[in-house]
Image (spheres, grey):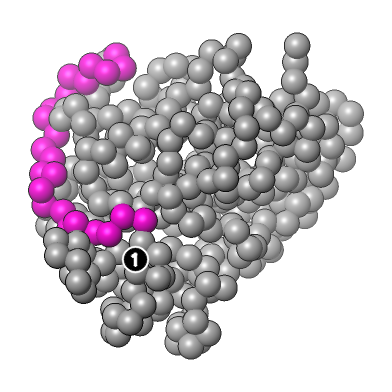
Amino acid sequence: MTLRRIATVEDLHQYLQVALQLEHATIPPYLTALYSMHPATNPDASRVIRVVAVEEMLHLTLAANLLNAVGGVPDLTADGFVPVYPCHLPDGEEDFEVGTRAFSPETIEGFLKIERPAEAEDQRFVDRERSELALLPTVDAHEDDLHFFSIGEFYAEIGEGLARLHAQLGDALFSGDPARQVGPEYYYSGGAAVVRVTDLDSAEAAMRVISEQGEGLGGGIFDEEGELAHYYRFQQLLLGRYYQPGDEAGRPSGPELDVDWSAVYPVLADADFTDYTGTGELEDAVLAHSAAYGAFLARLTEAFGGSPELLVPAVADMFRIRELATQIIRNPMPGRPGVNASPIFRGPALVSAAAAAAVTVA
């Protein structure tokens, strides 16, 4: 039986807002692992994680283009958009948690679960109760107990929903203002993959970029552009060797990849604001970082809302966020021997008004 999970345009809007949340939920874990490495060490591992994080920003942008194209309104500042880690991904993958933790083999194993390839079609949906750790109560107004195994399967369902609605509504489905689309000229990296979504073909192309960059093309390890998919990029770190064209999954034959698992700050896992209460300047630094990140999400919301040119100055925001995060990570946690501080990637609603006011967005 074919499960009709997206029956209305409103359902589609809900799914695509979840897609925004899903793409964003992977970014703080990747950045925390990246920033936890000692400076000037682990160049191979740093590059692998940095490339994936940049492409997740691309996926976030593509999800916003998709939502805008069908008349939705992307909002990265809504209550609950930013998860409290640890959490489950909002597409219903409940067999693992996502957290903000130091670079380690265990952390990379978690990243492999995030980027895992889709299962067979007959195993696509999983029947289970919704976990309290899920980011949203449900992504489905019709069958609340069905969830997805992988990000790729989640987007496959969006694609099927788009096709069904397009068959019903025709090109009227794509009612959004084309001026709200982000094009390559506004995107600082990976711009060739930025797809303006204006019809069914371009919508399918945008989702193909997201799925193939994550898990590979048709079960292969490379995407349509010949770039290694995220799952296999991360796998290289555990196998200690680069993939090259012609390799089979799990058997890279390229140059050795050098990883120093010890050259890492032992940052506090899944840090929350209560961990820093009464720590003075360290607490101020954590609040300032979180406020800066919230301002960054607000700028992205404005950019996706019809001002795509704001993505250009958003690059400076990202460098500022990195600078604040790395300063925090180098500080030992008071009263916790062998544990360093960790930044919190949260919106301004959960930080003090004073800290939020101290951050000026250019």
- The residue tagged with tag 1: helix, strand or loop? loop
| Residue at the spot 16% in from the left edge and 48% down from the top edge | 43
Q: How many marks?
A: 1
| Residue at the spot 13% in from the left edge and 44% down from the top edge | 261
Q: Position of residue 23 (x, y in %)?
A: 52, 46
Q: Quadrant of the N terminus?
A: top right
Amino acid residing under circle 1: Pro
Q: Determine which residue is flagged by label 1.
A: 343
Image quadrant assignment for residue 111: top left
| Residue at the spot 73% in from the left edge and 56% down from the top edge | 73
Residue 267 magenta? yes
**Most foreground residue, 18 or 80:** 80
Residue 327 magenta? no
Q: Position of residue 55 (x, y in %)?
A: 43, 45
Task: Indicate whether 117 appears above or below 40.
Answer: above
Image position of 330 (left or right of 26)? left
Residue 276 can be seen in this image: yes
Specify the segment rendered in magenta.
Answer: 248-270
Task: Indicate whether 30 appears above or below 208.
Answer: below
**Most foreground residue, 117 or 243:** 117
| Residue at the spot 67% in from the left edge and 36% down from the top edge | 203
Q: Position of residue 177 (x, y in %)?
A: 77, 55
Q: Position of residue 140 (x, y in %)?
A: 73, 36
Image position of 76 (left or right of 226)? right
**Most foreground residue, 141 or 34:** 141
Image quadrant assignment for residue 143: top right
Task: Indicate whether 32 appears above or below 313.
Answer: above
Q: Residues within 10 Å of mark 1 (few under 14, many from 20)?
A: many
